[in-house]
Image: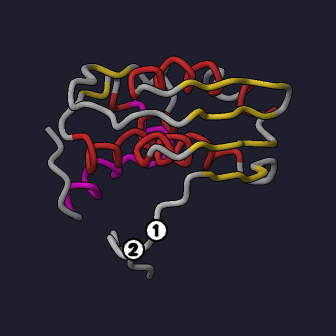
């Protein structure tokens, strides 16, 4: 197994850059983590994201605005512009009938408290026990 612990000792970088061509399913999670930490990001190799369950680049752009971020798409990459810290009034977030969008949003509650994920059962496509697993590690899932 792998144990991950939040550390206040590690310095938060102000820039993240990665080519996701061989790891497209990680883009949403990394984009939301950068948004949560106020980190500017450059995400390359995103061309396959437009042909998934939804256009994941467009979905990310529409969701990230809720977190005070701006996503600028250029060809096969996008930049996530740094933002001020998110407030706790995000509201209801759509997931565009996409299981990975739903799962990638969940960890944001660690920094930003309560929000609602619309159509949360969409995760049954790939990970039916996801919400139960989050409960098992201490998340409150209603």
**What residue sits right under mark 2 in the picture?**
4
- The percent position of residue 94, horizontal first and vertical second, equals 40, 19
Looking at the image, which residue is at 61% across and 49% down? 26
**Closer to us: 98 or 41:** 41
Secondary structure of the residue carrying tag 1 is loop
Q: Is residue 5 above or below residue 110?
A: below
Left or right placement of residue 90 versus residue 78 in this view: left
The relative height of residue 83 versus residue 8 in the rendered view (above or below) is above
| SS majority, magenta | helix
Where residue 130 sits: x, y (%)? 35, 50
The quadrant where residue 89 appears: top left
Q: Which mark is residue 11?
A: 1
Tell whether 27 sits left or right of 7.
right
Mark 1 neighbour density, 10 Å: few (under 14) some (14–19) many (20 or more): few
Is residue 8 found left or right of 81 in the rendered image? left
Label 1 vs 2, first from the N-terminus: 2
In whole angstroms, how far apart are the C-alphas of marks 1 and 2?
A: 16 Å
Is 128 magenta? The answer is yes
């Amino acid at each position: 197994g792998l144990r991950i612990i939040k550390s206040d000792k590690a310095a938060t970088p102000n820039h993240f850059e990665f080519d996701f061509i061989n790891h497209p399913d990680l883009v949403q999670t990394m984009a939301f983590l950068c948004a949560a930490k106020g980190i500017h990001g450059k995400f390359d190799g995103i061309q396959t994201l437009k042909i998934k369950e939804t256009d994941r680049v467009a979905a990310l752009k529409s969701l990230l605005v809720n977190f005070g971020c701006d996503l600028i798409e250029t060809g096969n990459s996008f930049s996530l512009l740094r933002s001020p810290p998110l407030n706790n009034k995000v509201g209801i977030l759509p997931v565009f009938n996409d299981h990975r969008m739903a799962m990638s949003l969940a960890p944001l509650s660690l920094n930003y408290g309560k929000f609602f994920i619309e159509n949360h059962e969409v995760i049954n496509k790939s990970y039916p026990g996801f919400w139960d697993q989050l409960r098992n590690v201490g998340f409150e899932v209603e």
